[in-house]
Image (cartoon, rainbow, N blue to C red):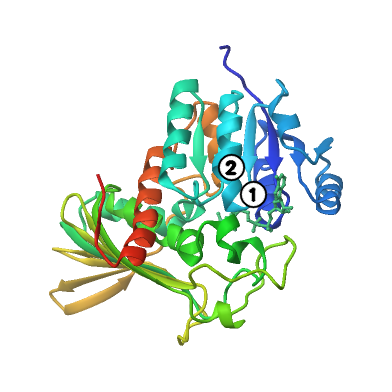
Amino acid sequence: MPKKDSFNVAIIGAGAIGLDHIQSFKLHPAARVTALAEVSPVRGREAADRFNIPHLVTDYRKLLSRPDIDVVSIALPNYLHAKVALAALRAGKHVMVDKPMATNARDAAKLVAAAKQGKRLLMVGQNIRFTPDVQTAKQLVTAGVLGEVYHAKTAWTRRSGIPRIGSWFTQKRYAGGGCTYDIGVHALDRCLYLLGEFDAAAVSGQTYTQLGNRGQGNGGWGRSEINPRAPFDVDDLSLALIKLKSGRTVLLEASWAAHQPEPDYNGTQLFGTEAGLILPPLKLCRPSKQGYVTELVTPRADLVTPNRMVHFIDCLLGKAKPHVPATESLAVQKILDAIYLSARTGREVRIR
Ligand SMILES: NC(=O)c1ccc[n+]([C@@H]2O[C@H](COP(=O)([O-])OP(=O)(O)OC[C@H]3O[C@@H](n4cnc5c(N)ncnc54)[C@H](O)[C@@H]3O)[C@@H](O)[C@H]2O)c1
């Protein structure tokens, strides 16, 4: 196949994050957002007009059959991620799919296999990896500043941040799961990325549905319709002890709604033999001649392209190596699934 120097992008879904997908691709001079699929005619028209997108359809399949589309970027409710991504990969498109990769690891594995078979780029939108503090932390870990890192704690916990009760986010049939899939995925991905290890041996998890089902903890995210009669049947708080293959451990916590002092906590802490690290803000904790110190580290902005879509196009141009390999996202999905299984069965789940 001849090497291309520009790419036509189709966005599928023009909800809250779909608009960010459009704006982000537009930052790259080699990307042209030429098509949009959105089932809501009003949201579709609004986005197409605002961003000058020439082709607007309601049925995404019409875009997959078009040979002039190179990249498909998926910003849909979770239950459609794997279905649409697989169809796009099979149609020969490169695929950016927002998190979570799928609603189960079996489907996620099909995506990895299809991308490999068709030699197409598949990446999950783990935007937090691209932040300067995470990149700087990664550099410190890789340089051995922490010594041997043996344990980590990672969390994204909100006091009142359910992405709108009654939207698809709070219904299992559309979301697959609650806060674990929605924000736990970010906290876990960031932590495993910093540890440089993704494969887990065993997971013990618990999930709760305590506030959202009583109409409490509502937040403001998302643009899809709300059905006030829809069941709230997903988790609003979850936690897990994850034992990685190497024997290292991760404690994960996620909540959309919980009685806690901070409105929103989103951080990771690593424990090494020589030092510890916490972010954000990025700090190193270690003994020194002057006593025990906790020092602020200035994040470096030059370490990676801060925008995931710009990076995606750079990868297609051969200017960068994928920063979020799909195999790592599959491993994350396996752990998230194991949390739900462990919560259901009351047992530790072993992952092969
Ligand atoms: N990376 C991040 O930090 C981040 C942040 C927010 C959301 N997300 C993810 O992005 C995805 C979308 O979230 P959102 O907040 O934009 O949701 P949203 O409800 O605001 O938007 C979803 C859009 O998809 C449209 N849609 C539904 N079915 C469709 C179909 N078959 N074809 C075309 N359009 C269809 C809806 O009409 C809606 O406009 C979710 O999976 C979410 O987890 C990621």
Q: Position of residue 53 (x, y in %)?
A: 81, 39
Q: Residue at x 60, y 63 (%)?
A: 169
Report the residue that reaches farthest toward the top.
1
Chain-order first, disc 1 or disc 2:
1
Residue at which label 1 appears: 76
Q: Position of residue 57 (x, y in %)?
A: 81, 38
* Relative vertical location of residue 5 with respect to residue 289 in this rendering, above or below: above
Q: Residue at x 28, y 48 (%)?
A: 196
Quadrant of the rendering where the N terminus is positioned: top right
In the image, which is nearer the foreground, mark 1 or mark 2? 1
Which sits in the foreground, 21 or 61? Answer: 61
Quadrant of the rendering where the C terminus is positioned: top left
Q: Position of residue 181 (x, y in %)?
A: 48, 59
* In the image: residue 232, left or right of residue 242: right
Do we see residue 254 in this rendering?
Answer: yes
Q: Residue at x 32, y 66 (%)?
A: 205
Does any atom of ligand 1 lie closer than 8 Å to the CB of label 2? Answer: no
Q: Amino acid at mark 1?
A: Leu
* Relative vertical location of residue 190 with respect to residue 253 in this rendering, above or below: above
* In the image: residue 277, left or right of residue 68: left
| Rendered image: mark on residue 309 | 2
Q: CA distance from mark 1 to mark 2?
A: 16 Å
Which sits in the foreground, 190 or 209? Answer: 209
**Disc 2 on helix, strand or loop?**
helix
* In the image: residue 303, left or right of residue 215: left
Does any atom of ligand 1 lie closer than 8 Å to the CB of label 1? Answer: yes
- Say few, some or many: other residues with alpha carbon within 10 Å of mark 1 (under 14 / 14 to 19 / 20 or more): many
Q: Amino acid at mark 2?
A: Met
- Say few, some or many: other residues with alpha carbon within 10 Å of mark 2 (under 14 / 14 to 19 / 20 or more): many
Which sits in the foreground, 263 or 298? Answer: 263
Which sits in the foreground, 317 or 101? Answer: 101
Determine the image quadrant of residue 293.
bottom left
